[in-house]
Amino acid sequence: MQQQNQPMGQNQAQPMPQPPNQVSSKDLLYLTDMLSWNLNATKKAHFFAQQCTIPEVKNALEQACQMHQKHYNMILQHLNNNQQSQMMQ
């Protein structure tokens, strides 16, 4: 059923003011996938950078490797920080 104040197709979820105390199993699977994607992309970019002889392409691959490594570490750090704060409560 459609709300009266919003036109069709405009039903958007409101952002949460703060993350929930528990992660759902679906969210956990998605977080695991995000870690896997970033780790896989890091490894592939590093491998291809090592194989590359064109300096510009090698540099771009190394930057991609660093970016995915940074994203992987950020996700992991966020999860670890939340886990530690949960244990203190």
Image (cartoon, grey):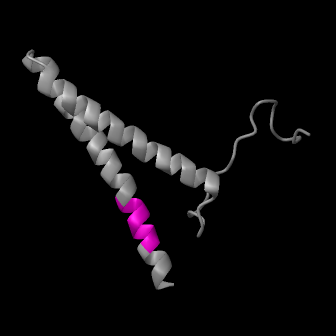
Helix, strand or loop: magenta stretch: helix
Q: Please provide percent x and percent y for residue 55.
A: 7, 19
* Whether residue 10 can be seen here: yes
Q: Please provide percent x and percent y for residue 20.
A: 60, 65
**Residue 83 position (above or below residue 27):** below
76 left or right of 66 in image = right
- Would residue 80 be counted in the magenta stretch? yes
Residue furthest to the top in view is: 54
Which residue is depicted at the point 37% across and 57% down?
A: 76
- Would residue 72 be counted in the magenta stretch? no
49 left or right of 2 in image = left
**Residue 80 position (above or below residue 60):** below
Which residue is depicted at the point 28% across and 37% down?
A: 42
* Whether residue 15 can be seen here: no
Which residue is depicted at the point 22% across and 40% down?
A: 66
Count of numbered circles on the image: 0
Which residue is depicted at the point 20% across and 24% down?
A: 48
Q: Nearer the viewer, residue 87 or 9?
A: 87
**Residue 36 position (above or below residue 44):** below
Residue furthest to the bottom in view is: 89
Q: Please provide percent x and percent y for residue 86.
A: 50, 76
Q: Please provide percent x and percent y for residue 22.
A: 60, 67
Magenta highlight range: 77-83
